[in-house]
Image (cartoon, grey):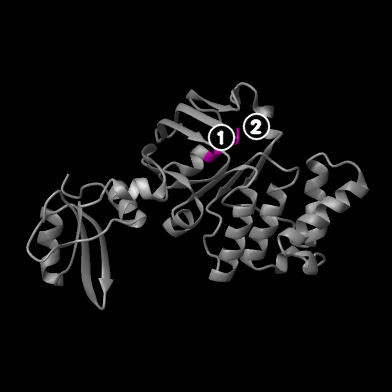
Amino acid sequence: MIDIDVVSKTYPNGVRALDNVSLHIPVGLFGLLGPNGAGKSSLMRTIATLQDPDSGSVRLDGVDTVADKDAMRRTLGYLPQEFGFYANLGAEATLDHFAELKGFANRRERREVVGRLLEQVNLHDVRRKAVGGFSGGMKQRLGIAVALLGNPRVIIVDEPTAGLDPTERNRFLNLLAEAGETAAVILSTHIVEDVEELCERLAVIAKGKVVASGSPADIAGTFAGRLWRRAVDKAELPDLERSLHVVAKRLVAGRPTLTVLADHRPADGFEPVSASLEDAYFALTAGDPRA
C-alpha cells in the first residue's frame, strides 16, 4: 500500500536523519522500531508529507505523494509524538472542531461521527469535561479519535504509549489493533513489547538506516545460536566489555548480567540463550563497543 524507495533526508545542521530508506508497508499494523534519534520521527514526517525528502519517493497505491501531497493528506490520520488541545474545551467540542476542519460540514453528520468516535475511544461519559483535566492516556485516546476522523486508510502514531500506565497502554493498543483491520497503521516506537504484541511486520531503524525488516520471529531468528548470557562480577565488567560484543547489560538480583553476540561461546561460563525480538533489537542497534 505504501512504498518507500531509497528516501534520504539531511537537515541544515548536517544531521543525516534518513539514509536510503526503503520499505513496503501493507494494510495492518507495521512497527517502526528504533532508539531515540534513530530517524523514526523524520520518516513519519516524510510519509505524512510534512517535509520533503532530499531524494527518493513515497508512493501510496502507486501515487507519488511527494509530488501530489493531497493524495496522502486526504486519507491520513496522524498522531504525532507531541500534540496539544485547547485545555478549556471539552472532548466533544474538541473533536467537533477537528471534524469540521476535516470536512464534515453537515452539523448532524458531524454530531453522529463525533459521538461514535467518543464511544469507540471510551470517552463518551466524559465528553463535556475540559481536556485540560484529562490524564495522559485520556488525551492519547482523544488524539487517536482525531486521527480516526474520516476513516483514514493510513494512520501514523509516533511514540503513542510513552508515559502511559499499563491500563491506558492496553486500551490504546487495542484501539490501534482495531484500526489496523482496515488501514495501514504505522506504529513508531522504541518500546519493543508494543511492536511484538501487535505487529505482524516491522522494521528496525538505527542512525537513519533500516537495519532489519520482516516479522518479529524472522528478525529474532537471524540471531539464533549467536547470543550468550552470563552473570558477572562488577570487577570483570571493564575487561569483558572491551573484549566482547556486549549487546545488553542488566542487573539481575544485584549482579550485572551480560548478553553477548558471538558465533561461538565467547568465554567460560556463558550459556546460549534463545533470541527474543528484544535481544535482536539490542544486537541490531547497540553496535560493537570494541569498534
Whole-percent x, y for residue 105 in the image: 88, 41
Mark pair 1, 2: CA separation: 8 Å
Q: Which residue is mark 2?
A: 72
SS assignment at label 2: helix
Residue furthest out toward the bottom: 253
Residue found 44% across the figure and 53% down from its top: 190
Work out whether 39 lies above or below 113.
above
Looking at the rendered structure, the kind of residue marked 2 is: Met
Whole-percent x, y for residue 227 in the image: 21, 55
Q: Which residue is mark 1?
A: 47
Work out whether 227 lies above or below 152.
below
Q: Quadrant of the N terminus?
A: top right
Q: What number is the disc on residue 284?
A: none
Work out whether 2 lies above or below 242.
above
Q: Is residue 184 magenta?
A: no
Q: Which quadrant of the structure image shows residue 127? A: bottom right
Looking at the rendered structure, the kind of residue marked 1 is: Ile
Whole-percent x, y for residue 43 in the image: 50, 38
Looking at the image, can residue 34 be seen?
no
The magenta stretch is 44-50
Badge 2, how many Cα within 10 Å: few under 14, some, many 20+? many
- Tell me whether the residue at label 1 lies in contact with that at label 2, contact meaning CB atoms closer than 8 angstroms: yes
Work out whether 257 lies above or below 15.
below
Whole-percent x, y for residue 97 in the image: 81, 49
SS assignment at label 1: helix
Mark 1 or mark 2, earlier in chain: 1
Q: Quadrant of the C terminus?
A: top left
Residue found 72% across the figure and 50% down from its top: 146
Q: Is residue 45 magenta?
A: yes
